[in-house]
Image (tube, rainbow, N blue to C red):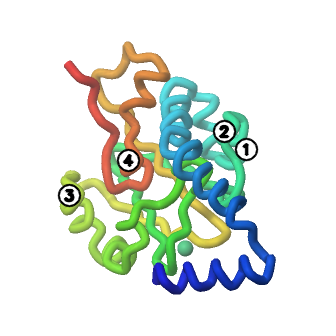
Amino acid sequence: MELRVRALETVLTQKGYVDPAALDELIDAYQTRVGPRNGARVVARAWVDAAFKDWLRRDATAAVASLGYQGRQGEHLVAVENSPGRHNMVVCTLCSCYPWPVLGLPPVWYKSTAYRARAVRDPRGVLADFGVTLPESTEIRVWDSTAEVRYLVIPERPPGTEGLDEEALAALVTRDSMIGTGLAGTPAP
Ligand code: FE
């Protein structure tokens, strides 16, 4: 796959369709400037601001854009909120669709055939592999991303975080908790 991508890039560059410097710039942007910290700030804001959370539920694209996060692969964003009775998990069964503006580039496992197939067939098993065990009574809802719609999981706010400010809360929000393969962290005692 890597060789094929490189061959394709070479051909496109030779024909003058792409500028390698521009590609490097794009990749650098999504690797270093855009990443899960963006999504973490969105989640932290939702935890402290009920009106923002409501907006996020109704129109995640607009709510997220209000914090300055928008762009490729985030045009139609849907936020799905975890609750004690329901856990949400995101996959792209077809390929690797992912909400870039809030989470950056997808992790390798997200793109793997194993995850894509099993997230749908055995979400509880996948969660166990990630070290997450939920009560049997918790419903697990799996959302299949498409080129049109990308999902962002709003994890549950961990207990014992009442006194934390937004920045400290954001630090507890992991990438995996926003994909649904993890939970938000708990504050250090
Ligand atoms: Fe996809």
Q: Are marks 1 and 3 in contact (CB under 8 Å)?
A: no
Q: Name the residue tied to disc 3.
A: 136
Mark 3 packing: few (<14 Cα in 10 Å), some, or many (20+)? few
Q: 157 or 166: which is nearer to us?
A: 166
Q: Are marks 3 and 2 in contact (CB under 8 Å)?
A: no
Rounded to the nearest angstrom, the CA distance separating label 1 from label 4 is 22 Å
Ligand 1: give its quadrant.
bottom right
Q: Are marks 3 and 4 in contact (CB under 8 Å)?
A: no
Residue drawn 34% across and 72% down? 115
Mark 2 packing: few (<14 Cα in 10 Å), some, or many (20+)? some
Q: Nearer the viewer, mark 4 or mark 2?
A: 4
Q: Name the residue tied to disc 2.
A: 55
Q: Are marks 4 and 2 in contact (CB under 8 Å)?
A: no
Q: Nearer the viewer, mark 1 or mark 3?
A: 1
Mark 1 packing: few (<14 Cα in 10 Å), some, or many (20+)? some
Q: Secondary structure at mark 4?
A: helix
Mark earlier in primary sequence (1, 3):
1
Mark 2 is on which residue type?
Trp
* x then y, percent, for residue 168: 41, 22
Mark 4 is on which residue type?
Ser
Q: Nearer the viewer, mark 3 or mark 2?
A: 2
* Outermost residue toward the front in this view: 14
Q: Is residue 176 above or below residue 113?
A: above
Mark 1 is on which residue type?
Ala
Mark earlier in primary sequence (2, 1):
2
Residue drawn 20% across and 19% down? 189
Residue drawn 37% across and 75% down? 112
Q: Are marks 2 and 1 in contact (CB under 8 Å)?
A: yes
Rounded to the nearest angstrom, the CA distance separating label 1 from label 3 is 35 Å
* Residue 62: numbered disc: 1
Q: Name the residue tied to disc 4.
A: 177
* Residue 38: numbered disc: none
